[in-house]
Every structure is written in structure tokens, then in C-alpha cells.
Image (cartoon, grey):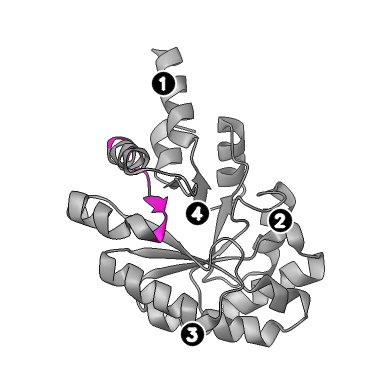
Amino acid sequence: MRTEEMLEKVDHTQLKAFATWEDIRKLCDEALEYHTASVCVPPSYVKRIHDTYGGKINICTVVGFPLGYSVTEAKAAEIRQALQDGCNEIDMVVNIGDVKNGDYGKVEAEIRTLKEVCGGHILKVIIETCYLTEEEKQAMCRAVTSAGADYIKTSTGFGTAGAVKEDVELFRKHIGPGVKIKAAGGVSSLEDLELFLELGCDRVGTSKAVGLCRERDRREK
């Protein structure tokens, strides 16, 4: 797969708690140079990125991140502020406690509420697969589909494990036709990136793709 084809599906990511503006600016400059799908950044940097780069860069941020157990109105407030600051895409974390309690209707209702707040902006739903059973993953596929979200996403990258082939295959079997898939967490090689794209992921979240592709292009020259 060509470098350009892979990178246009990448959410170029920097979500470490200690990320500085220098780190974020480097991320954005790389995203512009390599034409990634977006930059995925902490909410506190959205406005500064928008003010610095304007409409040149597609900004994604996270909500209820990384643990998911904020109340719905807090997540909604985060989304409203992010959109006001210039964000275009939202990656939210479901309330994993509600999932483990079997309160799937409550999870679906929250996703639906947050999609309404997003309006025409993209909402990706992180279900943190590493904590879920097969039954719970399937239930989340149904909830994400029924609530009208745009994407189901495997992981935050801050859990006990990240994206795996089996979970993407499960998603493909159980999501509705309007839902896309994002793999994230532990995507650390070009082989990983190609695998998830070949499996049908429309997006892959990783901090390493640009560096890996840059190194491959350097070797091939």
C-alpha cells in the first residue's frame, strides 16, 4: 500500500498528558506535510491549533477521555466547547461501567445525545475493547449503530491493550452499514497499519505512522 494511501486514513495522534505546544505544533506540521486525515489532540489545544492553522488542518479531539465515566452532560459540555474552539471530529469514550452493568440502553442514549450535540460533525465512539466480553462488544456495535454515531473505535490507547484483528472482524459483522471503524492503540508498525486498513478500517489512530512512513520513503530512495 502506498504511503499516501495509508496516511490519508490516519488520525495523527498526540494525547499524552505532558504534551507541550512544541509537541502539538510538530504534530500539526507533520499532518500538513503528509496529508493525514486529522490531528487527534487534547481539548485544551484545539483553540490554539485553530487560531494558528485556521482551516488548513482537520482537528479531532477526545471527550470523556480516557476513562469514560464522566456524566453525559459533562461530555456534552466538552463537545460544545470543542466545536466552538474549532474542532471538527469528536472521539468519545463510552461509560464502561454502564457497559459492564449491562445498561446498554443507557449507553445508547448517551451516544445519541452526544451525536445530537455534534450535529453534522463526526462522532467516533470508543468502546475500549480490552475491558469487554464478546457479548458486550456486540452490544456496543448495536448501540453505536442505533444511536447514529459515525464510527466505532476500538481503544483509547490508555487501557490494558489496544486494537486487535479479532475485534475489527467482530465490528464488521455486527455494526450497521452506516458505521465506520477506527482502530487505535498499539499500532506501532507499518505492518500493523496496513493490516487494519486491509481489514476495512476507515481510520487508524496512531502517533507513529508519519515517522514510519517517512523512514520507509527514506530507505526506498
- Quadrant for residue 135, please give it: bottom right
Foreground residue among 164 and 70: 70
Q: Quadrant of the C terminus?
A: top left
First in sequence: mark 3 or mark 4? 3
Residue pointed to by mark 4: 202
| Image depth: mark 1 or mark 3 in front | 3
Foreground residue among 122 and 70: 70
The disc at residue 167 is: 2
Task: Measure the alpha-carbon separation of dots 1 and 4.
Answer: 23 Å
In screen coordinates, is 80 left or right of 150?
left
What amino acid type should be assigned to the residue bearing mark 1?
Asp
First in sequence: mark 2 or mark 3? 3
Task: Measure the alpha-carbon separation of dots 1 and 3.
Answer: 44 Å
Verify CB contact (< 8 Å) between mark 2 and mark 4: no
Q: Is residue 83 above or below residue 38?
A: below
User: Residue 196's spot in the image, x, y percent?
Assistant: 60, 45
In screen coordinates, is 21 left or right of 190?
left
Q: Is residue 49 above or below residue 3?
A: below
Foreground residue among 9 and 200: 9
What amino acid type should be assigned to the residue bearing mark 3?
Thr
What amino acid type should be assigned to the residue bearing mark 4?
Asp
Q: Check disc 4: other Cα within 10 Å, few if <14, some if 14-19, many if 20+.
A: some
Q: Is residue 69 magenta?
A: no
Residue numbers of the magenta segment: 33-43
Which element carries disc 3, helix, strand or loop?
A: helix
- Quadrant for residue 54, please give it: bottom left
Which element carries disc 1, helix, strand or loop?
A: helix
Seen at 32% across and 38% down, the residue is 22
Residue pointed to by mark 3: 113
Residue pointed to by mark 1: 217
First in sequence: mark 2 or mark 4? 2
What amino acid type should be assigned to the residue bearing mark 2?
Asp
